[in-house]
Amino acid sequence: MQTRDLTPLDRLLAGAGNALRAIAAPAGRPARENPASDVAESDLTDQQKTHAAGLMRVNHAGEVAAQGLYQGHATVVRDPNLEAQMQRAANEEFDHLAWCEQRLAELNAGPSLLSPVWYAGAFAIGAASGILGDRWSLGFIAETEKQVCAHLDSHLDRLPDGDNKSRAIIKTMRDEEEEHGENAVEAGAADLPTPVQRLMQLTAKVMTNTAYRL
């Protein structure tokens, strides 16, 4: 069976479909088993559950943004091999999204009400950086994953001591995010200017502070 190269319209429609899957539809069944599926639920207080849910809501929002970022890059990427690499990463990120959503349900909480905003903003950043060239697109991915790893490390420290289910999910996510960043660097990611890195940190701070509550 013959295959054809994807046109910009094909990629845009694929991105729209992914947006609906990430925002409008429940995450459903991930492709891989939830790393916390065999971890016993802890006896958390209401306050601990609320705090854990806030952290997992932030992580879920981050995964929604990750879908937007990768799909934005994939829409304009020039190298088919890089496009395939980004799609593989996006698929793993979708598992992260599903795991976070499952954990939120277990904590009797829901995802951020601003998920469409997180997706749209990240998609725009991904597409804009990709227009500058694949090296810059990879640079944004590498820097994003670096900041995400630091953010997940902080969540591991801030989770309630007994919340082993959330901790198992975050640990797996953290390892895979680091791998995504390393793959971007190996593929030729450009080093982003310091002002851009700081702007990304500021944007992430706004998102995390907001998603914790909304």
Image (cartoon, grey):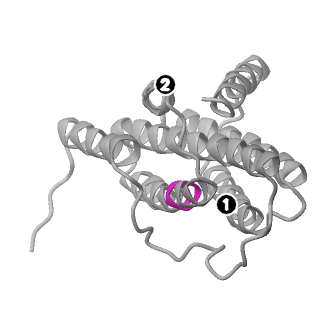
Q: Can you say which quadrant of the picture contains the N terminus?
A: bottom left
**Badge 1 element:** helix
**Badge 2 element:** helix
Q: Residue furthest front?
A: 46
Dot 2 corresponds to which residue?
Answer: 121
Q: Which mark is residue 173?
A: 1
| Point 72% across, 34% down: residue | 191
Lateral position of residue 70 relative to residue 80, left or right:
right
Most prominent secondary structure in the magenta stretch? helix
Q: Residue furthest left?
A: 1
Q: Which residues are magenta?
A: 96-100
Q: Residues within 10 Å of mark 2 (few under 14, many from 20)?
A: some
Q: Residues within 10 Å of mark 1 (few under 14, many from 20)?
A: many
In percent of width and height, residue 121 lies at 49, 25
| Point 58% across, 55% down: residue | 100
Earlier sequence position, callout 2 versus callout 1: 2
In percent of width and height, residue 167 lies at 77, 63
* Residue 193 visible in the snapshot: yes
> What amino acid is found at the position of numbered circle 1 in the picture?
Met
Lateral position of residue 68 relative to residue 43, left or right:
left
Q: Quadrant of residue 13?
A: top left
- As for residue 108 lying within the magenta part, the answer is no
> What amino acid is found at the position of numbered circle 2 in the picture?
Gly
| Point 42% across, 56% down: residue | 27
Q: Is residue 123 above or below residue 87?
A: above
Using the image as rendered, state which of residue 126 and residue 153 is in the foreground: 153
Using the image as rendered, state which of residue 29 and residue 182 is in the foreground: 29
